[in-house]
Image (cartoon, grey):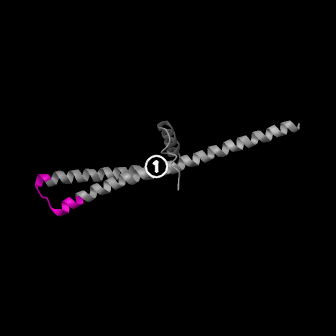
């Protein structure tokens, strides 16, 4: 189970992680897919609103129309929620990986400093 690193960050850190992530190749593809998902949800909402207006104007309150409207709104909400969840999961895993990289480099730097200090003492 992943830690909730991204959710605990400050807004400035979140913005920085988002910028770094969306500059990567994986980030670009995810950004494109999330955009498509959000676009589909907006189109479904628009379709539902247009159908509601047509239904009110024509006074055709059939079960099929109401069912399609409800399903389109539910799927639109589902697209939005899933897109947000995927984005947060990807950003969270990226933030954890960045933290591991930073820890690894700091540990390597500390080991290198200790090695250099030991070599200086020997000389």
The residue to which callout 1 is attached is: 88
What is the x, y in percent for residue 62?
15, 61
The tally of labels here is 1
- Give neighbour class at mark 1: few <14, some 14-19, many 20+ (Cα, 10 Å): some
State the residue in front, 11 or 27. Answer: 11
Which residue is found at the position 15% from the left and 55% from the top? 55
Residue 72: name its quadrant: bottom left
Q: Main secondary structure of the magenta part?
A: helix
Which residue is found at the position 39% from the left and 54% from the top? 82
- Left or right of 25 in this view: 53: left
**Secondary structure found at label 1:** helix
What is the x, y in percent for residue 73?
27, 54
What is the x, y in percent for residue 80?
36, 51
State the residue in front, 6 or 30. Answer: 6
> Furthest-bottom residue in view?
64
Magenta stretch holds residue 47 = no
Quadrant placement of the C terminus: top right
Magenta stretch holds residue 66 = yes
Q: Which residues are magenta?
A: 56-68
Q: Above or below — where is 44 with respect to 116?
A: below
Which residue is found at the position 53% from the left and 53% from the top? 2
């Amino acid at each position: 189970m992943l830690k909730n690193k991204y959710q605990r960050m400050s807004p400035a850190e979140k913005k920085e992680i988002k910028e770094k992530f969306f500059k990567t190749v994986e980030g670009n593809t995810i950004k494109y897919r999330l955009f498509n998902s959000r676009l589909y949800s907006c189109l479904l909402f628009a379709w539902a609103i247009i159908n509601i207006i047509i239904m009110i104007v024509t006074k055709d309150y059939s079960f099929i129309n109401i069912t399609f409207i409800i399903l389109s709104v539910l799927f639109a909400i589902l697209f939005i929620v899933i897109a947000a969840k995927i984005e947060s999961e990807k950003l969270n895993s990226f933030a954890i990986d960045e933290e591991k990289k930073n820890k690894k480099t700091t540990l390597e730097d500390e080991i290198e400093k200790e090695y250099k200090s030991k070599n200086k003492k020997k000389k």
